[in-house]
Image (tube, grey):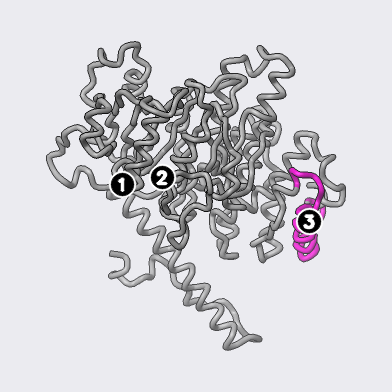
Amino acid sequence: MNNREIVQKLWNLCNVLRDDGITYHQYVTELTYLLFLKMMKETGREYIIPEAYRWDSLVTKSGIELKDHYQQLLLALGKEENELLKQIYTDAASNIREPKNLEKIIQSINSLDWYNAKQEGLGDLYEGLLEKNANEVKSGAGQYFTPRPLIEVIVELVNPQPGERCHDPAAGTFGFMIAADRHVRKQTDDYFDLSQEEIEFQKYKAFSGVELVRDTHRLAVMNALLHDIHGEIVLGDTLSSLGESLKNYDVILTNPPFGTKKGGERATRTDFTFMTSNKQLNFLQHIYRALKPNGKARAAVVVPDNVLFEGGVGADIRRDLMDKCELHTILRLPTGIFYAQGVKTNVLFFTRGTSDVGNTKEVWVYDLRTNMPSFGKRNPLTKEHFADFINAYTAEDRHQVQDERWNVFTREEIAKKGDSLDIGLIADESLSIYENLPDPIDSAEEAVEKLELAISLLNEVIAELKAVEQPNSYQPSNNTLKVAETPEVLKK
């Protein structure tokens, strides 16, 4: 079996857990607990795990004994002194209620072709699972999963080098840093061109990040481990006082979370010049301040459209960005490439100056949004879609590029627009408003998935109510709702 087939087989096991009411995201977290033990065995690193809780201790048990042992294992490993075990298992809890389901997953993992998986790369296998999770509407995981083709293009253009400190202040599953590591390895013959000291730096210090959500942090740690990256991934909030010490990076690559801080609160940072509850504006402010002021440190950050045009503090932060950095490129991204169809996003590329004033002279904008096809499951975004943008970005003389999507604006022109960066979109040649609507099949599939989830939740409520009414005689009803049996009006 190749990695793609293994990923599909592991993903299909999620169906086993439907009756336990487990979500896709919970399933990936559950798989992480189990895969970590199996992969430690496969890679000869089981010595970090107490013998009583190694992989084989799960394979040899069944039924209630297995479930009890597994729960004890999660609790015990979360209290271990080993930092890696602590990061994976702190506050770990199983959502699997049925022992037979747990046993089936363990046996299925045990029977996979791990020799081939190791040959192809365990990290690639795990990333395949994360991508599956992000592509499921029901999981909601797309909010922290940046499309891989976009990550690859950003990393290629920012071009991290050996010896540079790279960072992601909103790390998600660590995808940007893993791609940056892969990029450096490609330039150095998988690090064989480097000295031992340089290799140690790359593995243990070059790539770091911060992630706020504990379950996502677990996935990031696991992802980094399987790619042989051992840099610090902090569980915490970059927009808190923690972020004040995160500075002097050579490269920052990130896709910060969208939305406002919970309850509309402002960031709890004492070092910010401009105070706002807008998360993306705060992250942007953090990023350009965290770069080394050496004229070489650079960043690429994914932001929603509102960051480009929001007035008041938003304009102040954009002005400060263009003063402290050379904001040289804005990529206007297509809609539909993230988990929510209507989200409009952009990539800002900038380099920190050696002074704090007047670094931006002109801004180039590439419109990859207007008159573009509708992206979704049936028409996924690929690296080929970025080919013309890459040519324009890397051109020796950008003024010589002949591409209607590629336009330049001087700093003076931007100032006349109130320092709004909502610029560079070309004329929409669509013959009909319907051409820019989401793919109807994708929309229909999404609606069915949401309906199935609602029915599943209703069935759980019905079961619980019946159990309360008849605690000693409850049996599953034959009247369980199914999509096919829903009223015609609901189907429509």
> Residue 295 appears at what percent x and percent y?
47, 21
Provide residue 128's location: percent of width, then percent of height: 55, 39
Give the class, few, some or many, for how many residues have Cα within 10 Å of label 2's Cα (few <14, many ≥20): many
- Is residue 76 on the magenta stretch? yes
- For marks 2 and 1, the one nearer the N-term is 2
What amino acid is labelled 3 in the image? Leu
The amino acid on which the numbered mark 1 sits, given as a three-letter code, is Glu
Location of mark 3 (residue): 73
Circle on res. 281: 2
With respect to residue 201, does 344 lie above or below? below
Tell me the CA gap for discs 3 and 1: 50 Å
Residue ID for mark 1: 310
Report helix, strand or loop for mark 3: helix
Task: Report if the CB atoms under discs 2 and 3 are less than 8 Å apart.
Answer: no
Q: Is residue 168 magenta?
A: no
Bounds of the magenta segment: 59-85
- 337 left or right, relative to 373: right
Front-most of residues 175 and 377:
175
In the shown orientation, is residue 491 left or right of residue 140?
Answer: left
Identity of the amino acid at label 2? Answer: Leu
Mark 3: few/some/many CA within 10 Å (<14, 14-19, 20+): many
Which element carries disc 1, helix, strand or loop? loop
Residue 338 image point, x, y percent: 40, 44
Which residue sits at x=32%, y=42%? 315
The mark lying in front, picked from 2 and 3, is 2
- Image quadrant of residue 103? bottom right
Farthest bottom residue in view: 469
Q: Position of residue 404 (x, y in %)?
A: 21, 24
How far, Cα to Cα, is label 2 from label 1?
9 Å
Among all residues in the image, which is located at the extreme right? 51
332, 430: nearer the viewer: 332
